[in-house]
Image: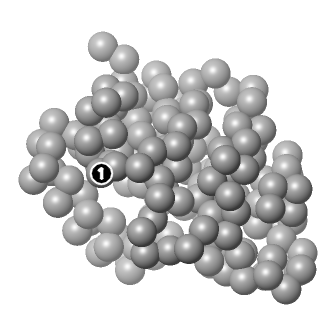
């Protein structure tokens, strides 16, 4: 059985922190599905199809990585794509507490899906999609926070 991990998020936008987590996970899994979900508590900045195109461009040379869009409970989507793992990145202790609570709820709903946490690189700790979006709203330079293989402004 292939080890399939789902890396869910709104990825609005996909930062170098997200990219780093996926690259760390590639040797651990047979397939990684980057799943762009609709966060009901957030208004999207990048159109969701453009986020998908951006991430596909970043990982175009990596056959283990697929990018999909979904709009259901993450654990239900795991079942649909046969993912046994949910991959999450952690920057801070606050991230851990939030992600732990979600992981525990997911286990209550689907005990066969395990959440795997990977730590971000220390230099990526302050980078968040929220901050990158704010910089972009004011036309600032985000090139140090987004993959070098894309220009984020091309995807707005």
Residue 116 visible to an observer of this rendering: no
Considering only vertical position in the picture, is 73 above or below 57?
below
Q: Pinpoint residue 149: horizontal percent, then vertical percent.
A: 85, 46
Q: Residues within 10 Å of mark 1 (few under 14, many from 20)?
A: few
Q: Residue at x 38, y 80 (%)?
A: 94
Question: How are the residues colored?
Answer: one colour
Considering only vertical position in the picture, is 82 above or below 147?
above
Q: Quadrant of residue 56?
A: top right
Q: Nearer the viewer, residue 61 or 8?
A: 8
Question: Mark 1 highlights which residue?
Answer: 73
Q: Quadrant of residue 40?
A: bottom left
Left or right: 105 as drawn, with respect to 130: left
Q: Quadrant of residue 100?
A: bottom left
Circle 1 sits in a helix, a strand or a loop, which is it?
loop
Q: Residue at x 26, y 41 (%)?
A: 76
What quarter of the picture does the N terminus occupy?
Answer: top left
Q: Pinpoint residue 49: horizontal percent, then vertical percent.
A: 67, 47
Q: Pinpoint residue 78: horizontal percent, then vertical percent.
A: 31, 37
Q: Residue at x 72, y 75 (%)?
A: 132
Q: Pinpoint residue 25: horizontal percent, then vertical percent.
A: 50, 39
What quarter of the picture does the C terminus occupy?
Answer: bottom right
Left or right: 150 as drawn, with respect to 21: right
Left or right: 88 as drawn, with respect to 106: right
Q: Residue at x 68, y 58 (%)?
A: 47
Q: Nearer the viewer, residue 57 or 38?
A: 38
């Amino acid at each position: 059985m292939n080890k399939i991990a789902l890396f869910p998020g709104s990825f609005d936008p996909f930062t170098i922190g997200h990219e780093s987590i996926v690259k760390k996970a590639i040797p651990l899994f047979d397939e990684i599905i980057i799943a762009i979900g609709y966060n009901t508590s957030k208004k999207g900045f990048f159109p969701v199809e453009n986020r998908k195109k951006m991430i596909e461009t970043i990982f175009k040379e990596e056959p283990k990585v697929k990018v999909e869009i979904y709009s259901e409970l993450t654990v239900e989507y795991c079942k649909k794509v046969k993912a046994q793992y949910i991959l999450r990145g952690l920057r801070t202790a606050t991230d851990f507490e939030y992600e732990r609570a979600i992981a525990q709820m997911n286990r209550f709903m689907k005990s066969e899906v395990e959440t795997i946490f990977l730590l971000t690189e220390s230099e990526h700790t302050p980078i968040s999609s929220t901050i990158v979006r704010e910089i972009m709203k004011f036309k600032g330079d985000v090139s140090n926070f987004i993959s070098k293989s894309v220009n984020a402004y091309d995807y707005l």
